[in-house]
């Protein structure tokens, strides 16, 4: 998987977690549906570890399992990306240089 694909996978993971915590298997399923690339478990795990190290995602252990969830910074980043996307659409459609 290329660096660009990994970056897109990061955005897909962050977006999938925006609505709340998810278990690994559910997250893998959702991200696989979003991504145009095949999402291997190792790639997902590596990307989740990276996002955890960057303090955008956290992994929480519970008595009945574990899940991944956004940190405050991760939520703010998803909001910022949505705002950039909105801005881009607005300025692309108006034809402004």
Image: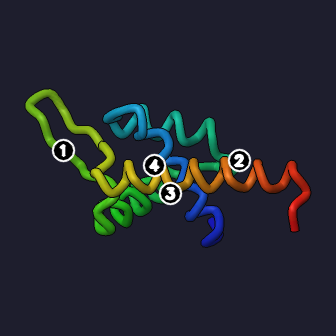
Which circle marks residue 36 in the picture? 2
Find the distance from the CA under tag 4 to the CA under tag 1. 16 Å
Kindly indicate whether the residue at mark 4 contacts the one at mark 3 (C-beta within 8 angstroms): yes
- Which numbered disc covers residue 14? 4
Discs 4, 1 touching: Cβ within 8 Å: no
Graded by Cα atoms within 10 Å as few (under 14), some (14 to 19) or many (20 or more), the crowding at tag 2 reads few
Disc 4 vs disc 1: which is toward the camera? 4
Distance, label 2 to label 1, CA atoms, is 28 Å
Q: Quadrant of the C terminus?
A: bottom right
- The residue that label 3 is drawn on is 10
Choose the circle earlier in sequence order: 1 or 3.
3
Of residues 14 and 24, which is closer to you in this image?
A: 14
The CA span between labels 1 and 3 is 19 Å
CA gap, disc 3 to disc 2?
A: 13 Å
Secondary structure of the residue carrying tag 1 is strand
For marks 3 and 2, give the one nearer the viewer.
3
Q: Label 3 neighbourhood size at 10 Å, few (<14), some (14-19), many (20+)?
A: some
Specify which label sits upstream in the sequence, 3 or 2: 3
Query: Residue at coordinates 50% horizontally, 55% vertically from top-left?
Result: 80
Q: Residue 93's x, y, as percent?
A: 86, 49
Disc 2 is placed on an element classified as loop
Q: Quadrant of residue 45?
A: bottom left
Q: Nearer the viewer, residue 51 or 63?
A: 51
Q: CA distance from mark 3 to mark 4?
A: 6 Å
Residue of label 1: 60
The residue at the point 58 percent across, 51 percent down is 83
The residue positioned 21% from the left and 38% from the top of the image is 66
Q: Is residue 68 left or right of residue 76?
A: left
């Amino acid at each position: 998987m290329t660096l660009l694909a990994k970056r897109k996978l990061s955005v897909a993971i962050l977006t999938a977690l925006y609505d709340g915590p998810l278990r690994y298997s559910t997250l893998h399923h959702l991200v696989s549906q979003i991504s145009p690339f095949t999402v291997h478990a190792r790639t997902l795990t590596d990307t989740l570890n990276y996002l955890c190290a960057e303090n955008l995602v956290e992994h929480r252990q519970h008595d009945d399992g574990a899940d991944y969830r956004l940190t405050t910074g991760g939520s703010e980043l998803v909001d910022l990306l949505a705002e950039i996307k909105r801005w881009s659409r607005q300025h692309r459609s108006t034809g402004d240089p």
